[in-house]
Amino acid sequence: MRPCGVFDKSYAQDIAIVRTWQHWTILISALIVLYLFPLFGSYYLTSFMNLLAISVIAVLGLQIVSGYCGQISFGQAAFMAIGAYTSSVLTIHFGVSFWLALPLSGIVAGAVGIIGGAPSLRIKGMYLAMATIAIHFVVIWLILHLDITGSFKGLYPPYPSVGGFEFDTDERMYYIIMTVMVIMTYAARNLMRTKVGRAFVAIRDNDLAGEVMGVNLYHYKLLAFFIACFYAGIAGSLWAHLITVVNAEQFTLLHALEYVGMLIIGGMGSIPGVFFGVLFIRILNEAVMFTSPALAKSLPWLGTSPAAALGLIAFGLAVIIFLIFEPRGLAHRWEIFKASYRLYPFAY
């Protein structure tokens, strides 16, 4: 998928993620723009980028377990809740620094994910989906009935700080969130090129054939759930310290369905597809937020209910349209565009 005349001279170059000087130029330029964004972007856009990056981290984990390993999971929002509450409890009740609470939140969420992934060896498909939904409700029930989690009142975690400097604004938190997102994206992209990533794909394509070839199904399925939940826990921790208010209502089953929708629209089994799907749904949500009041005002005979439900309607229609007309997601369309661009004006 590269222009004619561009070839690799060594195995190291062949397996590299960034291969040509053009790729390096684009990557470095993108990182510079990314880190300078708060200097020229508005507060609204900076807040939007924070939400976007946290969603990317959560959906990256879902991509690993569902897109690459083929295990259906509707529990990503619940594991985000575990990460958010773990980080909040550690920083509030035990005085742990945010910088230590952040990885611990991912580890705790991953440990719970192993428990949730344990049935995956014997059940699959919709049965596994129902098991992850059950895990979601169990997690939310425990959060609402434990004193250490603040029960129905929730928790108020502090802002991260280094010395006397607090990351107490969206602009300051932006740099933490974006750095974590870049690291997690690189880790996910690199993971798929390893023995573990190839084992995940073998399980997704045909778990029986993979087992015959020597892939330990139980080990790799549990590992996929652990990694996915680790990502969700990291995303939840960042969310908690960005908003500084953690409540169970922030992690509903609708949020879990939204993450799955992002995966479908972006493209299963593609790291760039995560960014496409998250960006598409988040922009759609913002468009609905600005459109709904105008709809209610211009069509008063409809009442407020259709305008309030416009977000769910738009999300459902988007998923249906992509499932029918572009089941491989926006990532597939991006690959087609790149191929046609590089080969133009030739037809082959």
Image (cartoon, rainbow, N blue to C red):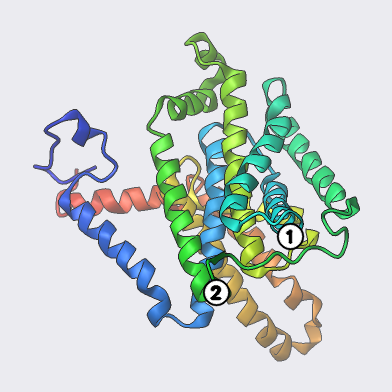
Identify whether 174 is placed above or below 333: below
Q: Which mark is residue 61?
A: none
Name the residue: 66% across, 54% down.
96
Residue type at mark 2 is Asp
Task: Determine the secondary structure under disc 1.
Answer: helix
Residue farthest toward the front in the current orientation of the protein: 163
Between residues 51 and 324, which one lies in front from this camera angle?
51
Residue type at mark 1 is Ile
Where residue 273 sits: x, y (%)? 45, 50
Task: Determine the secondary structure under disc 2.
Answer: helix
Name the residue: 74% across, 70% down.
309
Identify whether 95 is placed above or below 287: above
Please indicate whether residue 325 sits to the left or right of residue 74 in the image: left
The residue pinned by badge 1 equals: 92
The residue pinned by badge 2 equals: 170
Quadrant containing the N terminus is top left
Between residues 92 and 213, which one lies in front from this camera angle?
92
Please indicate whether residue 310 sits to the left or right of residue 11 in the image: right
Name the residue: 47% across, 11% down.
213
Residue 226 visible (yes or no): yes
